[in-house]
């Protein structure tokens, strides 16, 4: 989850200087020129948006006359506030089509319709790859559906063992350890390391993901937040700590919301100079970068400098699950002491088999990565030509700034209902208030016709809603 960072300076001319109050926002929206959207609901159960429960009035009391709490009223009042702020989250009811990525079937108030997905984290479309699907089917035929237990109690299959070996090799490490998701692998690993290293101090990048923040918080270790991608600030903070203090520096390679890339070598230089461990989250990079898909660290020849590399099987590899890779002793330490690993059922063997097939394919095939980078470049060029306000970065993530939660939702709704394009709005708390955006994630399977349709649709909506163009 991104926090305020250097993206603010790049988009300052595109966003309001202050966040308006609820009444100011309501008055502002009411005063805007009317745009007929009566055919497109914004809160309709058929759109997958809201459950069927009454919305609370702002004056509804959260306590009964006898002083006891009215829990349902409290829940409704909090959801009411989210709606008023424009930050109520909406799910889009989709069915992905095997073999037809990035198409999906949307189930809405008008029935079913085909849409093109432009915001999937299945970055390379590997969730649809024939070898991945065949491996999953084969494992189901061999092993059945579930894992049967925790890794310690009957849940470790041979597919788990092979997958951990493959991940260790991918990152040039001695060992790897699987988790049920990337969120859990960060939460469990950081929480375990920081809590059990005596007197550990964690140095965390200010834009680290929520899973990393929660893991550090759960550890109850002392923490310091260093400025985003700033080795000098990290050095200053480490220099103030005693040399014998255990230190852990945690950061990401590709930041998911702004798409910027960390200066890994410089951060490692600083950490090494102060005897600190390094923890790198490569969630948005594995599969996509490096000669074999090992991420930014592999691309830059730095894997050996990281104490621990964390990744996911759900994005570049197109399946689900998380993992860490490091020394044999480190992975065994987390395996032995992490409650987030010990007390949960293992991934199904079919999932492990599918992930194994995906990793093996991307280790030897660069075709998907090359095509992916070409499509990203094409989308960026077309957006620039149309004057649409994207954040410039060197990754595959294309943030298109709107700067207001209500307008961001309107753009997304218009794309879906009027153009058959699914592009989810990204609002607070995922991004800072005032930096609301659409997060475009091109894939190798998007065509030039798809790109043309996307840019034409965005340009038309930008003009219709009178949104600001790039300076």
Image: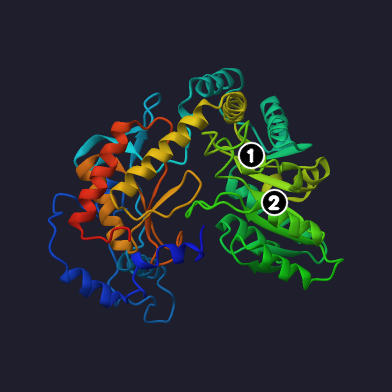
> In this image, 466 relative to 234: left or right?
left
> In this image, 192 relative to 129: left or right?
right
Q: Is residue 278 above or below residue 289?
A: below
Q: Is residue 387 above or below residue 143?
A: below
Q: Secondary structure at mark 1?
A: helix
- Name the residue rendered at 75%, 67% in the picture: 238
Q: CA distance from mark 1 to mark 2?
A: 12 Å
Q: Residue furthest bottom?
A: 66
Q: Which residue is mark 1?
A: 299
State the mark number for residue 365. none
Which circle's residue, 1 or 2, is located before the other in the chain? 2
- Name the residue rendered at 34%, 30% in the picture: 447
Q: Is residue 148 above or below residue 83?
A: above
Q: Is residue 69 above or below residue 302?
A: below
- Name the residue rendered at 13%, 65% in the picture: 33
Q: Secondary structure at mark 2?
A: helix
Q: Front-most of 93 and 257?
A: 257
Snapshot quadrant of residue 154: top right
Q: Residues within 10 Å of mark 2 (few under 14, many from 20)?
A: some
State the mark number for residue 265. 2
Query: Is residue 109 in view from this perspective?
Result: no
Q: Front-most of 397 and 50?
A: 397
């Amino acid at each position: 989850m991104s926090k305020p960072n250097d993206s603010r300076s790049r988009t300052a001319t595109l966003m309001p200087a202050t966040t308006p109050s609820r009444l100011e926002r309501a008055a502002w929206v009411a005063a805007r020129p009317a745009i007929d959207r009566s055919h497109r609901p914004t809160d309709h159960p058929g759109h997958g948006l809201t459950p069927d429960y009454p919305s609370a009035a702002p004056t509804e009391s959260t306590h009964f006359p006898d002083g006891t709490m009215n829990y349902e009223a409290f829940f409704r009042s909090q959801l009411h506030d989210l709606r008023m702020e424009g930050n109520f989250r909406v799910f889009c009811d989709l069915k992905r089509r095997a073999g037809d990525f990035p198409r999906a079937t949307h189930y809405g108030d008008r029935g079913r319709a085909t849409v093109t997905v432009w915001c999937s984290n299945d970055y390379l479309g590997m969730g649809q790859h024939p070898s991945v699907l065949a491996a999953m089917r084969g494992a189901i035929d061999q092993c059945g559906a579930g894992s049967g237990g925790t890794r310690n109690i009957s849940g470790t299959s041979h597919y788990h063992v092979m997958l951990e070996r493959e991940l260790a090799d991918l990152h040039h490490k001695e060992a790897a350890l699987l988790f049920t998701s990337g969120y859990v692998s960060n939460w469990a690993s950081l929480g375990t390391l920081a809590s059990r290293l005596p007197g550990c101090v964690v140095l965390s990048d200010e834009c680290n993901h929520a899973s990393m923040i929660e893991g550090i918080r759960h550890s109850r270790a002392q923490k310091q937040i260093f400025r985003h991608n700033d080795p000098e600030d990290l050095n200053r903070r480490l220099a103030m700590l005693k040399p014998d203090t255990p230190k852990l520096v945690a950061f990401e390679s590709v930041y998911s919301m702004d798409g910027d890339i960390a200066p890994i070598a410089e951060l490692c230089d600083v950490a090494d100079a102060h005897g600190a461990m390094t923890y790198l989250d490569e969630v948005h990079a594995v599969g996509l970068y490096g000669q074999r898909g090992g991420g930014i660290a592999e691309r830059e020849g730095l894997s050996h400098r990281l104490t621990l590399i964390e990744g996911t099987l759900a994005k570049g590899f197109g399946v689900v699950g998380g993992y860490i890779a490091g020394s044999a002793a480190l992975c065994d330490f987390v395996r032995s002491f992490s409650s987030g690993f010990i007390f949960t059922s293992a991934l199904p063997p079919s999932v492990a088999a599918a992930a194994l097939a995906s990793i093996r394919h991307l280790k030897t095939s660069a075709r998907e990565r090359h095509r992916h980078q070409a499509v990203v470049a094409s989308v960026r060029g077309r957006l620039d030509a149309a004057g649409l306000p994207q954040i410039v970065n060197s990754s595959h993530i294309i943030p298109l700034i709107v700067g207001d939660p209500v307008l961001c939702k309107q753009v997304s709704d218009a794309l879906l209902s009027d153009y058959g394009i699914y592009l989810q709005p990204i609002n607070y708390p995922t991004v800072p208030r005032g930096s609301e955006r659409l997060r475009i994630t091109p894939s190798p399977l998007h065509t030039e016709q798809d790109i043309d349709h996307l840019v034409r649709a965005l340009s038309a909506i930008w003009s219709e809603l009178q949104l600001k163009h790039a300076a």
